[in-house]
Structures are given as structure tokens and as C-alpha cells.
Image: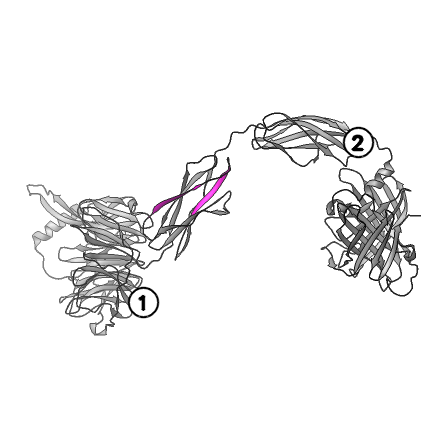
Amino acid sequence: MKTGAKRISSFVILVLFMSFFNAGTSTWAAPGFQIPGVDVGIDIGQYIKPNFPVINPSILPVILPVTDDTKDDRLPSLSNGYAFWYKGGDGIYMWDTSKDVSTAQKVVSDSGIRSLSSYAKKVAYSSHIEKIIDPGGGIPPIHFAIDTVNLWDGHTTKEVAFGIEPSLYGNKVAYAQYDGSDYEIVVNDGSAEAVTNNHLNDSSPSLYGDKVAWHAWDGHDYEIYYGNASHYKKLTNNGYNDKFPSFYDGKIAWQGYDGHDWEIYYYDGTHVIQVTNNDNNDLYPSLYDGKIAWQGWDGHDWEIYYWDSKKNTIARVTNNQVHDKEPSLYNGAILWRSKVGSDYDIMYCAFDIPQKPTVSTLPAQNITQTSGKIRGAVNPNGQATTYYFEWGTSTSYGHETTHRDAGSFVKTQNVDETLANLTPGTTYHYRLVAQNPSGTSHGSDRTFTTTAISVSMPTASTGSASDVTETSAVLSGTINPQGAETRFRFEYGPDTSYGSATPWFAGGNGTSDMDVNASITGLDSSTTYHFRIVAQNSAGSVTGNDATFTTGAQANPMADTRQRFTGWWYDSTQQGTGLAVAIQDNNKVFLAWFVYDAQGRTTWYASGGSMANANTYVGELRKWTGWAWGTGPYSMPTSEVAGSVTLVFNKGSNDSISFTATVNGTVVTNNYTAFMKDFAPGDKDSRNLTGWWYDPNYNGMGFYLDARGGKMAMVWYNYRDDHSPRWWTSTGAFADGAAAYSGALDGWMNGQCVGCPFTSPPQMIPGEGGTITINFTDADHATATVGSTTINLQRFLIP
């Protein structure tokens, strides 16, 4: 407890003052509790005194003038990327360091500010004010000059208590408060808690978390203390002054007198390290995470210095002929005041924080049908920086503007590029990108839309059908593009749902009516079809009126089936198997079904017989066993019934065959479409070579040929050494009317067996059967050469 009598008059006046000043509040707690335990500090003989070298960089860091006016700017405080300072006679200003300094704004209007401390976007400050108490009863008014601690929380200002030298952390404020005898340390987070209650004149608090460091007179000199209301320690205990502590996470920096001048000291939680050891004064340290900034005398003026406990060197931040004082450090960035002319201004340096550029994408300007100016803002943050824009019709962009130099300043600058040759009426995405040694920064995505060209929808009217046959017709109509690029097509089908359509055709960009037409094929005979024309441009689509036509009656349905269904057939979704079908003039059918056996080897089944009607074939399915190709004298193959097969020929715009086969009790169904329509669309060879070919001297094996669209597709059916059936394929170029075809005979394996589910296409064995050359002597005869063997081929006529 404090001891010693106080004058009654002073006490009465103080009580009157306290009653007036704190009426209705609980912000002040009167002393009167027991002194907490105090540990004796570390003797100076225990100090570690390395002599850290001072580094004078050949190129000084980029320093940003934050203020530049004729008023005296002082009391700099930096925390969490926000800078605060007091502009003399005006008030407190705040600047978000991630933005341009021009965005700094006044947040507190007060001309009597003595000290301040910030935390993120908050600031606590002491303000010198005068109070007048009128006791009444004939007692003259009492005039008081006093300092109050106030808090601006980012929105509003409130008075915390009376006191000086505030230190802010989170929502707590530590400050020194006069109790009528000397100054004590108080921490306030809505209610006040006295940390000290002694006669040591405690002041200059530095708050971190729930603890505070300060300096106090121990009866001989000033020493450093730290702790809280329940327990605090005396850190230093020597014969020299130690003052102005800066506290961070259990670690403390301060200035201590060594008997000659002031030096900087650092307590790392275990040891005390003497950071400076020179003949010039080093003052007012600011600590952050093992880093310290301070002002040091260089023999001419005050300069700013910086020390990182991990790097063990002292860096000189400023080197000029003016005073640089009172640094505030946050994560390697430093804020201080510098004498500029007749007054002090605030300076900032991201000394030890290499940062990526700061970028933002700004709205586009000057948009036309084919051009637009895209804009952005870039801050190099003190490193050499380049920038460019990404742009395109989606957020994938796809285009970049020229890469340009943004300099190495700590200053935001606006940049822009003009894009040309754009498409009218189109939305474009863009963003600004900037790069420096610390990385790449991307601005947000923005869009603009070029001005659309005024376009009218086309007009369209359906005409009539001409040249109508059993399976084809020519459709006509009229369109007017109305000056914009237009396309058209015809929709057609058995009803007004249509269901089929021609490809799109170019209609140009004229402004008058134009007649158009398109041919359609693959129609059913004796069928009424609906059709209409459709025209489309950038303004929209229009359809013509519905019209109809009826195809002619089929003179010979069987001939139509023969013409449409002789050829290769396959399932495009399960490639590797299929049918070779020939329907001859006598309405006889011979087919081969090429599949794979249980070992995944190629095999085939055959069937021959008469058509049941123009749309159906039903017959036995036989499996053959024969002479192994190229071994010994030829012998006639034999066959056995393996099952049955039914083909239903489905006529329409896209012909198909419904296939059903029964093999050893296994039923297989499929729906096959024309292979050559996909493989080689175009006209058949003029000699109509499609069908079965064989050599009577090698009866029981043969070739299926199909030539159209400038290509040949063939299969050779023969037998393996074990007499089981197999097939090889060959495909290649074959011009209409060519006399010879030559190609490799490719084998296949691991295909789909009968009744097995489809898993994947089979594997090709290139050239397994060697090469084959076929020379056509006329439309019905040819010679095939395989290796050294010549096979005399002729058309196979189904008996």
C-alpha cells in the first residue's frame, strides 16, 4: 500500500474533480488493493552484447511520403496495415496502406492530442482538455487542465477515462493515470482494472494480449516492468535508466542508458540482448515479432534503423540530411515522421515486406460496335512490375494485351488499353494482371458489351416440291436476309412435327427476296410429306408456312429393297461385328454374319435363301468347317446348321436392318445401319461391284466387296489351320472405275462373342493375312493375288 500523508485541500479538490469527471460511469477504479508480487529483474551483467554490423544498402528502400503539407504531422502509429498520425491543430488521420495515399482521411477532429496508439482500424489517443467545476455555495469555480483517454472504434469516438499515453490492443486500452500522488498503469476494456498501486510513477505502457509492459522509477532510476494486475515482473535492475518499452507476445524492446548514451535492448523471453553498442543515442524502439525499428543519431541527424533477430544485422532504412524520428513498425513496414522544410511529414516504407503488385480492374469506357477501352489500376509496391490485360469472350480469356512496364514505385497508377476489331453485339470479359518478383496478382473479372448492329429478322415463305420421285424431291422457298448474314434450311417429315431437316445453307446478306431450294432423298414411296423453310440471322429465326407433297408409288418393291439393302451393315455403337448382305435379281439372299468365337478370334456364320417378302428374310444360319488356306491340296468345306436368322428391312430416311439370330439356344438381336454411308459416303462404283465374289476352285470361301465414295471395303472369308472359320478385312482408296485395288489384309482379336455383352472395340492385327491385289477384268471377273497365290474371282450367284 502507498504510505504518506496527502494535503486535505488537494484530496478534496481531487475528489470533487473525480466525482464530476466520472459521474455516472465506472471507468475509474480507486486504488486500495494489495500490491501484487513483483519478481526482481535481470542484472545488466547478464546482457548479451553482440556487435551487430550496420548495413548501408547501396540503393535505399523506396520511401513513400504519406503527407506533404505545411502542418506538423507527428505521432505515427502502424498496425495491421492501417496507418494513423496526428496532424497538428487538426486531428487524427487514417490511411489503408493497401491503397493509394490519396485515400487517407481524417477520422478524429481534435486539436489537443498528446499521444496515440492504433490497433488495426481503431485508434486510442489522449487529449488535453480543460474542465471547470462550480461547487456552488459561494465557492469559486475550480479550473482543471487534464488529459483524457479516448477510443475511436472505426465508427464512433468515446471517452474511456482520464489518463495519458494510451496503448491499444484489440478492445483493451492501457494507459497511465494519475491517482493524486503519482501515475499508475490501468487497463480498460469497458471497465477499468488497476495493474499497479505503488509510488513508482509508472508510465509509458505497451499492451499486448492481457499483459502490459511499462517503465517506472524504482527510487534510483527507471526500470522496465511487465505483467498484469495479478502478477508482474521487474525485468531490469541496474543503475541506469531503462525507458519506453515496446511489448509483443512476451518479448520486449526498450531504450536503456549504458553510462554513455542510449542503446536499444531486447528481451526474447529468456535473455536480454543489447542490440546497439555505439557512441550515439538510439531511441524509441518499436517491436513486432522479433523485429525492431528505432531512431538513431548518425552524428548529423536522426535516422531510422531496423533489426531482425533472425538475420542478426542492423539495416539503415534512411540516409539523408533531415531528422527521421519515432518509427512505428508492423511486420517489416515502418511509419515515421521526417523533417521536411519547416515541419514534419509522415513517411512510409515497406522495408522488409516484398509484396505482389496490387491491382484492380476498372470499368471499360468508349465502347463502340468494334472497339472498347479496358482499364485498371496497378501499384508495384516498390518492386519492378509489368502488367497486361487478359480478355476474351469468356473467363478463359484467350487473349493478352502487350506487356508493359509499371515501374517500381509504391503508388497506384491507372492504366488502359484499347481493343479493336471486336464483334458487334458481343460480351467480352477482361481483367488486369501484374507481375513482380514476389508474384502475380489478378484483378477481378469485368465485362463490357460492344454495341449491336441494328438487324431485322429475315423473312421466309415455303414454296413447292418438284422432281418428286418414289424416294426423293426438290424443295423450294423464298427468303429475304434483310441485310444481315442469313442461313436457311428445310424441315420435313410425315407430319407437322417434321423430324428431319436438310443441312444449313448460306443465304447471304442481301436485302431482296431470293429463291432457294434443296434436294432430299431416302424417302418412303407413296407417302405424304410435310415441309417448311426456316431462315435465321443474328436477330432471330422465322419459319415459312407448311406445305406438302406425296412421293410416287413404288413400281417394284423387291427391286427397291435389293437396291437399298445390298451392302455392309454394322452397329456404330458396338463396332467390330456386322453383316455383309447381297440381294440378287432372283430375290435370293446370301449373307455372312462376322463375329468372334469364345477365344475372341474372328469367326463367321452364313445363310442363303429366298426373300420371304420385300421386307423380310428368314433362313438357316450355318457354320462352316473348311480347308486351311495355303496348306496341302484343297478340299471342299462342310457345314452344319448352327441356328436361324431373321432380317427385317426397315425403309426410311435412314434405312436399317432389324437382326435376330439364334445360335445354340442363344438369341442375339441388333439394329444395323449402313456402314458405307459413314465410311465412304458417295456414289457406288459405276460397275456396281458390291456383292459376293469367289473362285469355284476354292468353293466354300470367298470375298465380299463394296466400292463407293472413292474407297473399297472388303472381307475375305476363309479357314484357319484348325479348320475353324475366320475373316480378314481390307480397306483403302479405290477410285470409281479403277482397274486394281491393293491393300493389307488385317486381322482382328478380342472381339464380341455371340451373346456376349459389348465391352470395347476389338484390336486390329495389321497385315495378319499379308497383302492382296485385285485386278478387275470386267464388271463380273477379277483376279486376286495373295502372296504367290492367284485366285480367279467371279460373281457369286446364289443358286
Total tally of numbered discs in the picture: 2
Residue located at (17% from left, 70% from top): 238
Residue 352 in sight from this viewpoint: yes
Say which element carries label 2. Answer: loop
Residue most toward the bottom? 45
Whether residue 495 can be seen here: no
Q: For the point 25% across and 44% down, which residue is it?
A: 106
Q: How crowded is mark 1: few (under 14 residues within 10 Å), some or many (20 or more)?
A: few
Residue, disc 2 = 469
Does residue 376 belong to the magenta stretch? no
Between 767 and 278, the one nearer to me in the picture: 767
Tell me if residue 284 comes above or below residue 650 in the rendering.
below
What's under tag 1, amino acid-wise? Lys
Mark 2 neighbour class, 10 Å CA radius: few under 14, some 14 to 19, many 20 or more: some
| Residue stretch in magenta | 411-433
- Quarter of the image where one finds residue 334: bottom left
Q: Where is residue 471 in the image (x, y as percent from the top left)?
A: 79, 34
Name the residue type under label 2: Thr
For marks 2 and 1, the one nearer the N-term is 1
Task: Give the dominant element type of the magenta stretch: helix, strand or loop.
Answer: strand
State the residue in front, 455 or 495: 455
**Which of the pair 184/640 is nearer the observer?**
640
For this view, does 761 lie left or right of residue 660?
Answer: left
Secondary structure beneath dot 1 equals loop
Circle on res. 362: none
Q: Position of residue 615 (x, y in %)?
A: 85, 40
Queried whether the magenta region covers residue 429, the answer comes back as yes
Q: Which mark is residue 311?
A: 1
